[in-house]
Amino acid sequence: REKQLPELEKRLDYVESLGPINTSHSDESYSQHMIETITSYFGKQETSEELSAHYSTQPEFEHARAKVYEGLKDLVLDTKATLQQWYARRDGLPVPFESYIMLTISNHETKERKYIEFVKYEKKLFEALNYLMARIFENRRYPVAVKVLVLFPSIFRLTPGLRIQIEEMQFEGEADRAFTELAPYIEESSYSLKCLKVDVHDLSIFQHLKLRSAEHLVIVGLGTFEWLPIYLNLENHKVHIMGDYFEELMPVDDFMALIRHWISCRKEVGASFRYPLKVGDEEELERKVFKRIKKQFKNSISGHRNAKIPTDNSTTLKVSVEASGNGEE
């Protein structure tokens, strides 16, 4: 920034030298393209009397020049403030300001800021973190309500006595370790979870009761495992397999085994299993799986890339290819 300051000041002086700054509002007739061209000229390009004279004939000139002036002025002031504190620290002098941490409680839906507090920042980094954690979470009369708890493989120290009531959880790494280490903090009434999203690196994760009891299970990061036995034993109401980790489509026999299982296992109405397809898979699925369904289940009703099959529970199982946000499933 020290090297940038002279150039910024030079550009600011040049823009100001062309006359008084008119801070009038933009006119609807102004060309946005011309405004951007002029601001880019003053802010980034090499200036000349000829080009400045040319642009000065444009109706957008004064508005664009005022816009550049305000931007350059802010950059110069910001750069000077940054350098001033750096010089002070370099020379062992007090910095010309006080540092604060701003805590804001806001409504995520309405964007309304309900409460703002400034706390003087005069601690080391780990001390500041501990202070913030205590300030936010300590001495709560009731558990902290968390809609989605997202966990990453890192060290995170929570305050003693903290209790959390969660609805959904997302994490990477070992499920057993995550659930065990979080047990002192999470209210047992949080389980079963509405949704649990996990990266799978080890099949033992599927033995965990809190995973098996989640209403909606999202599986990411699949490895080269034998997946059919896992799929057949999942008891979650909804299962969503995510990612493009499959080099090949699930074998037709596996699809049919999964379909037969869902026909006989008395799933509740609304249960679902979503499996990702790559471009072109839907044609193979239609050619092989849907033909097999029509042949094996005489009471099924087939449509375009879908089939409806009566179940042993007097309900209907729908097998279909449907578009999702990232492709087809």
Image (cartoon, rainbow, N blue to C red):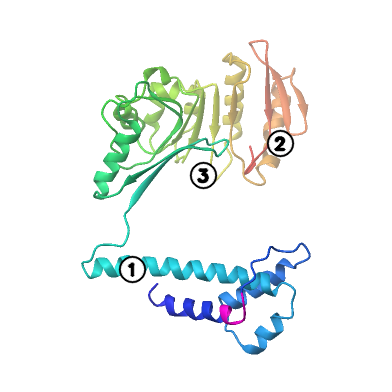
Q: Helix, strand or loop at disc 1? A: helix
Residue 245 is tagged as 3
Q: Earlier in the sequence, mark 1 or mark 2?
A: 1
Residue 112 in picture, x, y percent from top left = 54, 38
Q: CA distance from mark 3 to mark 2?
A: 21 Å
Asked if residue 324 is positioned above or below residue 96 in the image, the reply reads above
Residue at which label 1 appears: 84
Asked whether residue 17 is drawn in magenta, I would say yes
User: Marks 1 and 3: which is nearer the front?
Assistant: 1
14, 187: nearer the viewer = 14
Mark 3 vs 2, N-terminal side: 3
Q: CA distance from mark 1 to mark 2?
A: 68 Å
Image position, residue 93 (x, y; %): 23, 66
Q: Nearer the viewer, mark 3 or mark 2?
A: 3
The residue under label 2 is 286
Which amino acid lies under the numbered mark 3 shown in the image of this protein?
Tyr
Of the residues under marks 1 and 3, which one precedes in the sequence? 1
- The magenta stretch is 15-20
Instruction: Please identify the quadrant where the C terminus is shown.
Output: top right
